[in-house]
Image (spheres, rainbow, N blue to C red):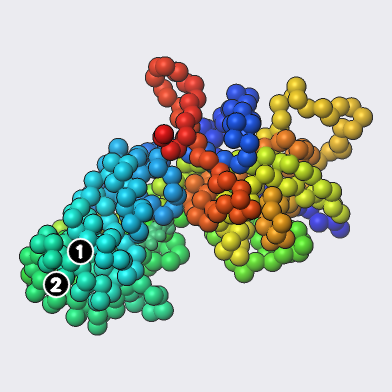
C-alpha cells in the first residue's frame, strides 16, 4: 500500500479566510509579495484586541480582580505593544530592549512587569524609576534591587518568583527555604520595598497544576501578610495553550511516523497542536478549578482572600493574530512528492529550530488565473500533490516544512505559501539575516468598519517611519 500524506488543516478566522481565500485578499497578498520581493509577516491587531477582551472577560465573569500582562517575548512587532497600551493591558518584559519598546508604544511604567533571571542593574534601575512591578528570581537579585532602590531613594514594587515545588529542576525562582530568607529581608527594607506578592510560570499547559500552585501562593500571601508585608497579588504566569488544529485530524495523525517527512526525518517531540481547553478558556478553567486542599474554587479563594490574580499570556493573546507569507521559487520532483523551495528561511518559523516541526498545513495561494500559463496539455492529474518545503539557503537542515503536505493543486513557482497562525513565537523569535538576506518585513492589516474604507482592508508597515 502506498503511503498517504496526511493533512492537518489549521483553524482560521473569517478575517484570515478573506485574506487567504478571498479573491481580493489573495490579490493583496500577491501584491505585497511583489512589493517586498521576499517573505513577509501579516499582523492582525484586531484579533489581539479580541483575545485580550476574552482574557479580561474570563476574570470578570469569575468575579476575580485580575490583570492581564502581554508577554512581549512572543512577538517582536511594535503593534501588539501598541494595542496593549491602547486597550489597557499590562506588558511583561524581560530585557531592556523589550522595556524600551513597550514604553515607546505608550505602555505606562506602572503597567509593566519585568521578569527574567538575574536582570542587569540598569534594567532594574529603570524598572524602579518607572514604578514597574519587578519579579525577583533569586536572593542575590533581591539584594541588588533593594540596594538600587535605596540609592535612587525610590520605592520598588516586587513579586517574588517561586520555584514550583513540582518542578525542582527548574532554574527559575526561589524555593521555600530561600523565600524564608527573602521575606524578612523585604520587611527590613520596607517602606522602600513593597512585596506585592508571588509569581510563578509553569511549563506545559495543564490547568490543574496552575490552580494548585496559585492557591498555594494565595495561602503564602496570607502568611506573609502576618509579617506585615502587603502581598495582595499572585501571578500565575503564561502557558495558555493555543488550539491550532481540529481534534479529529490531530487524533488521526501520527506525528512520529517517519514516512510523513522528507528524508524519513523523526523528531523527539511536538507542541500539542490540538488543545480542547485553550486561551481564555484555559484561564476560565483554572479559575473554576478547586485546588488541592481547598473546598472552594480558585476564584472564590482569590476573592475571599483579597488576592488579585495576574496572568501573563504570550502565545494565546496572539492566537490568529498573524500569518507568514512565502513565495514558491522552485519545484523539484522527488519519488512520490515534490520539494518546494521558497524565498525565505526556516528562521522565520522557530519550531524548526527547537528540533521539532510546525505542523499545521501551510496554504497555497495560487497566482491569479490570468498569469497562470498552465493549460490543457500539461494540466496535472487529480491530487493531492504532496510536497515538503525548503528554505532559500545552502543548509540541508533549513527546511521550513519537513512534512509532505498534501496540496490540493500542484504547487508552482510564483504561488504563495501561507503559514497560518504564526504570530505566537513562530514569526520572529529566531530570525537572523543569514546569507545577508534581509529580515522579512511586518505588515499590519486592519479591516476598518468606518470611513474612509468601509469593510475594506488597509495595510501599513509595523514600524512607522
Ligand atoms: C514566556 C513567559 C510567559 C508567556 O508564556 P506563554 O506560553 O507565551 O503564554 C509568561 N511569563 C513568563 C515569566 C514567561 O517566561
Q: Name the residue beneath numbered marker 1.
A: 158
Tell me where residue 272 appears, x and y as whole percent: 54, 59
Q: Is residue 293 visible?
A: no
Asked if residue 26 is positioned above or below residue 157 in the image, the reply reads: above
Alpha carbon separation for disc pair 2 and 1: 9 Å
Specify whether tag 2 is near ligand 1 (CB below 8 Å): no
> Which quadrant of the picture is home to ligand 1?
bottom left
Residue that extends furthest to the front in the rendered view of this protein: 436
Residue that extends furthest to the bottom in the rendered view of this protein: 177
Q: Residues within 10 Å of mark 1 (few under 14, many from 20)?
A: many
Asked if residue 453 is positioned above or below residue 149 in the image, the reply reads: above
* Residue at position x 53%, y 56% in the image: 430
Q: As drawn, is 214 to the left or to the right of 403?
A: left
Tell me where residue 357 appears, x and y as whole percent: 62, 58
Q: Quadrant of the N terminus?
A: bottom right
Q: Secondary structure at mark 1?
A: strand
Evaluate if marks 2 and 1 touch, with contact meaning CB atoms under 8 Å apart. Answer: yes
Q: Quadrant of the C terminus?
A: top left
* Residue at position x 78%, y 27% in the image: 372
* Residue at position x 31%, y 53% in the image: 99
Numbered mark located on residue 186 in the image: 2
Instruction: Return the disc, 2 or 1, that comes first in the chain's sequence.
Output: 1
Q: Nearer the viewer, residue 281 or 372?
A: 372
Q: Is residue 448 visible?
A: yes
Tell me where residue 121 appears, x and y as whole percent: 26, 66
Amino acid at each position: 500500500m502506498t503511503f498517504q500524506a496526511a493533512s492537518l488543516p489549521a483553524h482560521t478566522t473569517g478575517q484570515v479566510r478573506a485574506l487567504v481565500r478571498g479573491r481580493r485578499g489573495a490579490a493583496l497578498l500577491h501584491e505585497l509579495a511583489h512589493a517586498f520581493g521576499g517573505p513577509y509577516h501579516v499582523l492582525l491587531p484586531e484579533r489581539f484586541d479580541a483575545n485580550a477582551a476574552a482574557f479580561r472577560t474570563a476574570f470578570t465573569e469569575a468575579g476575580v480582580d485580575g490583570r492581564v500582562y502581554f508577554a512581549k517575548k512572543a512577538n517582536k512587532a511594535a503593534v501588539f505593544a501598541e494595542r496593549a497600551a491602547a486597550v489597557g493591558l499590562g506588558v511583561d518584559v524581560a530585557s531592556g530592549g523589550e522595556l524600551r519598546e513597550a514604553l515607546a508604544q505608550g505602555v505606562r511604567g506602572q503597567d509593566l512587569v519585568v521578569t527574567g533571571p538575574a536582570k542587569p542593574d540598569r534594567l532594574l534601575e529603570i524598572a524602579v524609576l518607572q514604578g514597574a512591578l519587578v519579579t525577583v528570581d533569586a536572593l542575590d537579585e533581591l539584594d541588588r534591587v533593594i540596594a538600587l532602590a535605596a540609592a535612587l531613594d525610590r520605592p520598588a514594587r516586587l513579586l517574588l518568583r517561586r520555584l514550583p515545588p513540582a518542578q525542582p529542576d527548574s532554574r527559575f525562582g526561589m524555593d521555600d527555604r530561600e523565600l524564608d530568607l527573602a521575606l524578612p529581608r523585604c520587611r527590613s527594607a520596607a517602606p522602600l520595598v513593597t512585596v506585592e506578592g508571588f509569581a510563578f510560570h509553569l511549563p506545559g499547559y495543564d490547568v490543574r497544576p496552575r490552580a494548585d500552585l496559585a492557591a498555594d501562593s494565595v495561602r503564602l500571601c496570607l502568611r506573609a501578610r502576618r509579617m506585615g508585608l502587603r502581598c495582595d497579588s499572585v501571578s500565575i504566569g503564561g502557558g495558555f495553550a493555543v488550539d491550532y488544529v481540529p481534534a479529529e485530524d490531530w487524533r488521526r495523525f501520527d506525528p512520529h511516523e517517519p514516512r510523513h517527512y522528507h528524508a524519513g526525518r523523526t523528531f523527539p517531540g511536538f507542541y500539542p497542536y490540538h488543545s480542547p481547553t485553550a486561551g481564555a478558556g484555559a484561564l476560565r478553567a483554572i479559575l473554576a478549578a478547586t485546588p488541592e486542599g481547598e473546598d472552594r474554587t480558585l476564584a472564590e479563594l482569590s476573592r475571599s482572600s483579597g488576592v488579585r490574580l495576574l496572568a501573563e499570556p504570550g502565545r494565546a493573546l496572539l492566537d490568529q493574530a498573524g500569518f507568514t507569507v512565502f513565495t514558491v521559487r522552485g519545484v523539484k520532483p522527488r519519488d512520490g512528492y515534490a520539494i518546494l523551495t521558497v524565498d525565505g528561511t526556516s528562521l522565520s518559523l522557530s519550531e524548526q529550530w527547537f528540533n521539532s516541526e510546525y505542523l499545521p498545513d501551510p496554504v497555497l495561494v495560487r497566482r491569479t488565473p490570468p498569469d497562470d500559463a498552465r493549460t490543457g496539455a500539461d494540466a496535472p492529474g487529480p491530487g493531492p500533490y504532496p510536497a515538503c518545503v525548503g528554505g532559500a539557503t545552502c543548509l540541508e537542515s533549513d527546511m521550513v516544512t519537513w512534512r509532505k503536505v498534501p496540496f490540493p493543486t500542484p504547487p508552482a513557482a510564483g504561488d504563495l505559501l501561507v503559514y497560518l497562525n504564526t504570530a505566537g513565537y513562530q514569526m520572529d523569535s529566531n530570525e537572523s539575516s543569514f546569507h545577508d538576506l534581509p529580515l522579512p518585513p511586518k505588515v499590519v492589516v486592519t479591516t476598518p468598519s468606518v470611513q474612509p474604507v468601509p469593510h475594506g482592508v488597509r495595510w501599513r508597515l509595523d514600524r512607522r517611519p
